[in-house]
Amino acid sequence: MGAKILVVEDEPAIVELLDVNLTSAGYTVLKAGDAATANVILREMSPDLVLVDWGLPGRSGMDFIRAVRRDADTTNLPLIMLTARAADQDKVYGLENGADDYITKPFSPREVIARVNAALRRRSPQAKSAQIKFADLCIDPDLHQVLVGNRPLVMSPTEFRLLHFLMTYPQRVHTRAQLLDKVWGTGSYVEERSVDAYVGRLRSLLEPSGHAGMIETVRGVGYRFSCNSGA
Ligand code: CA
């Protein structure tokens, strides 16, 4: 049996679309039309990932996400927000309140599957300390080394931490504030625009080998490491 995906959505057509596509991708689909039903399923079925619509009857998807994050049992559960709201502020708000990723409606089923696969992969425990490799770009946290093919890339410790963090969570969008928190640490006095400067430096290091495009700017939101682009 594949991983269990809980779909929390009140529009039957969207539930159906997700059900058909996730099932054919090998997942087991659980369904809830509102947050209260979703909470029961969370306790009884322990899903591996939740897709949550923003606009639900009763409690909003955002409230639901916040509650899931506050609960010790589900604090690490991967959550992907489904939203018709294309506004950048809503995306930032969602990510900063505990969503791992967001998908804007209308979406393509292929995109949903790709995001679900990526979210489940980065939650697997082995993903953190091991070597991470995309195409011929490889980062090794134990050796503190970045390789393009067989050629090492020399970078500063902060550049290394930033690249490692981005590569650990491929496809996930991080806001500047989140990157500051995770890469520089909560107590740091670094400004958000420093993140842009470091991203710029990483891109120039990756430029000669054609990998600069893997660090994508998500306009109005932040940055993402894309394993689909680049050499
Ligand atoms: Ca809805």
Image: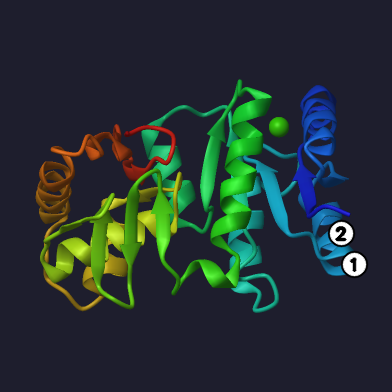
On screen, 76 above or below 170?
Answer: below
Q: Residue 14, image x and y in percent?
A: 77, 26
Q: Secondary structure at mark 2?
A: helix
Q: Quadrant of residue 122?
A: bottom right
The disc label shown at residue 44, or none = 1
Q: Which amino acid, by three-letter code, is at mark 1?
A: Glu
Q: Secondary structure at mark 1?
A: helix
**Snapshot quadrant of residue 123:** bottom right
What is the x, y in percent for residue 181?
29, 67
Which residue in the structure is indicated by mark 2?
A: 41
Q: Name the residue nearer the viewer: 223 or 181.
A: 223
Mark 2 sits near ligand 1, with its Cβ under 8 Å away: no
Q: Residue at x 62, y 40 (%)?
A: 54
Image quadrant of ligand 1? top right
Q: Tell me residue 59's x, y (percent).
A: 71, 49
- Amino acid type of the residue that numbered disc 2 sits on in the rendered structure: Ile
Mark 2 and mark 1: span between their CA atoms? Answer: 5 Å
Whether residues under marks 2 and 1 lie with C-beta atoms below 8 angstroms apart, the answer is: yes
At x 22% / y 34%, what residue is drawn? 210
- Is residue 88 shown above or below 158? above
